[in-house]
Amino acid sequence: MYTLVYFYPAQWIFGGSGLDFANAVVYNKASNLQGFNSGKGPSMAARNLKQQAYNVIKEKIINCEFAPGAVYNEEYLCEEVNTSRTPVRDALGRLEQEGLIKIMPKRGIVVSPLTLKDVRMVYEMRLLLEPYSLRQYGDALGEPEILRYHRFFSLPDISGRQFFQADDDFHMWIMEAADNIYLKKNYELLYNQNRRFRILTGTLSARRVRETCGEHVRILTACLEKDWENAALAMEDHLHKSREGTFELLLARQREEAGFRR
């Protein structure tokens, strides 16, 4: 049995006066502070070990170091995290709740695969949540941030690393404006899977990067005009195109892998 532990979304921290996408840091790591055991529950040190195990395993899954569909045992994961079974088991319970793994008795821990069906399901949910967030909570988006994103995506030449970081942060920023913790928790699950799609399929073509930047600019232009309906429609158009691009990349990868197996 595993205990359900609530997961709080990472907060993106930006340095300097502008949006420093190239050096953004995710603050979701366990604190290094040492606690004490009050006798009423796990000590601070024990909680830190559990959070550390969770962070390490989750990052390896999202970065596809633990490949989709791969099977691991607890002993291997304990070695990877350099900790005992208890923190690893706690982390696995949380990751199963998030849909990133499946615990199979007498078989091991299976990393959730990424299929065309997964792409359809993730984008089905994104099409429900992201346009809705713009329609319902667009007024919570700050104009200075809208302008910064607008300027960034209007740049004529954006490097791959900067683009991918900015693209992730742009969508998360829109969802963070929603005054609804349940909506944001659900989006966190989609966000993790979307990162896995991107890493698994490789980088986008320069053409698709330029097209995506233009789609973002159209969304942001409507946001500057406080036209949330057109912003939502522009987001729907962007997500449809993004979904088709992901389908193409995943199919190309599957064809490539099938060729290697012959």
Image (cartoon, rainbow, N blue to C red):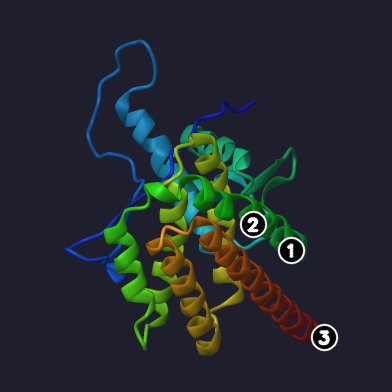
Residue 55 x %, y %: 43, 47
* Residue 166: mark in rendering: none
Of marks 1 and 2, the one in the foreground: 2
Which residue is the extreme one toward the top? 39
Would residue 81 be visible to someone looking at this image?
Answer: no
Dot 2 alpha-carbon crowd within 10 angstroms: few under 14, some 14 to 19, many 20 or more = some
Q: State the CA–CA distance, disc 3 to disc 1.
A: 21 Å
Q: Amino acid at mark 1?
A: Thr
Residue tagged 3:
262
Taking depth in this image into account, of 106 and 162 the one nearest to the observer is: 162
Using residue 262 as the reference point, say whether residue 169 is left or right of it.
left
Taking depth in this image into account, of 180 and 79 the one nearest to the observer is: 180
Using residue 69 as the reference point, say whether residue 258 is left or right of it.
right
- Label 3: which secondary element: loop
Could you tell me which residue is drawn at 62 percent across and 41 percent down? 96
Could you tell me which residue is drawn at 67 percent across and 53 percent down? 112
Q: State the CA–CA distance, disc 1 to disc 2.
A: 18 Å
Using residue 13 as the reference point, say whether residue 103 is left or right of it.
right
Dot 1 alpha-carbon crowd within 10 angstroms: few under 14, some 14 to 19, many 20 or more = some
Give the quarter of the figure containing the C terminus.
bottom right
Could you tell me which residue is drawn at 25 percent across and 26 percent down? 35
Residue tagged 2:
127
Total number of numbered labels? Answer: 3
Q: Amino acid at mark 3?
A: Arg
* Residue 115: mark in rendering: 1
Q: Cβ–Cβ below 8 Å for labels 1 and 2? A: no
Q: Earlier in the sequence, mark 3 or mark 2?
A: 2
